[in-house]
Image (cartoon, rainbow, N blue to C red):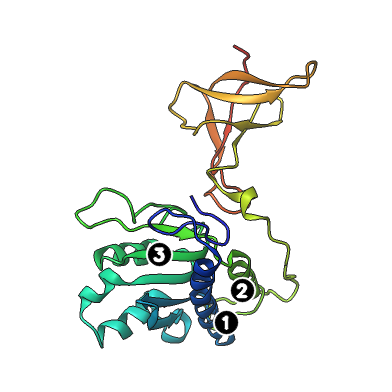
Amino acid sequence: MALPRHVVDPNGHVLNEEERTYHESFMREAIGMAELALQTDETPVGCVFVKDGEIIGRGMNATNRTLNGTRHAEFIALAEILSKHPISILQETDLYVTVEPCVMCASALRQYHIRAVYFGCWNDRFGGTGGVLTIHSDPSVDKPYPVYGGIFREEAILLLRKFYVQENEKAPEPKQKKTRELKTEILPLEMVNPDQKAKKLKGAKKENVPVTTTVFAAKETVTVSTVTSTLKEIVAVDTTISTAKIFQQEKPNDQNPGGSTVSVALESS
């Protein structure tokens, strides 16, 4: 579970102020790389690789400059590291990156046996370490690695928003973004954590009903909680969804951590 300001480390113990300062110092370095990427019209993602308290590699997104979709920040930094060190050094190295690694990068990091990954905000479209897929921990011949997010999450999100409101002159058909406004309001981490916020069903009465369990379309029933019109209290309700259909498919993200919305008819048990 991702935690704000990083209150636990890969070994599971609570961090003190000195330890939090340690992790945040490296995330600041990663944010610096992301800011540099933004200045060069790249998607603002930056990273640093750290071994024994020393930065051994830096990277920032370079897909626009190189016209190469694989030139992500992690790969740029890995190329620098492997030009100077044996691949085995990554087994004792941690990655600090402003945005959750994508599926491609998450897979490479596992094959390289990275020790741990710390990131700022979730990648709700291509995330490979929990945002979409869980490549870092799925069954594999390669050792899994721990992942922790939320360090300077707000700063990472704001950088991405700054990029998406500016023009990309290298795009095949640049979208007009001059009328877009930069939104600076960001929901607190506690409000968007998928493990803490209930998923939602949209019922026959056109009301949002928080769901207490994961929803699968093929599952016969799911337990939900709703407020009765008379008692005004939370009661358990069994909702049959055997004939339900998904009418809106959305990937989990900061604003919609639950994912799919399912059309159901509410039936009290």
Q: Amino acid at mark 2?
A: Leu
* Disc 2 element: helix
Tag 1, which secondary structure? helix
Side (left or right) of 77 relative to 86: right
Residue located beneath label 2 in the image: 159
Query: Which residue carries the number 1 mark?
Result: 35
What is the number of the mark on residue 117? 3
For this orientation, the residue located farthest to the top is 269
Q: Nearer the viewer, residue 259 or 67?
A: 259
- Kindly report the distance in space between the C-alpha atoms of the residues bearing marks 2 and 3: 20 Å
Along the viewing direction, whichever of 236 and 17 lies nearer the viewer: 17
Q: Quadrant of residue 159?
A: bottom right
- The span from disc 1 to disc 2 (Cα, nearest Å) is 7 Å
Q: Earlier in the sequence, mark 3 or mark 1?
A: 1
* Amino acid identity at mark 3: Val
Residue type, numbered disc 1:
Glu
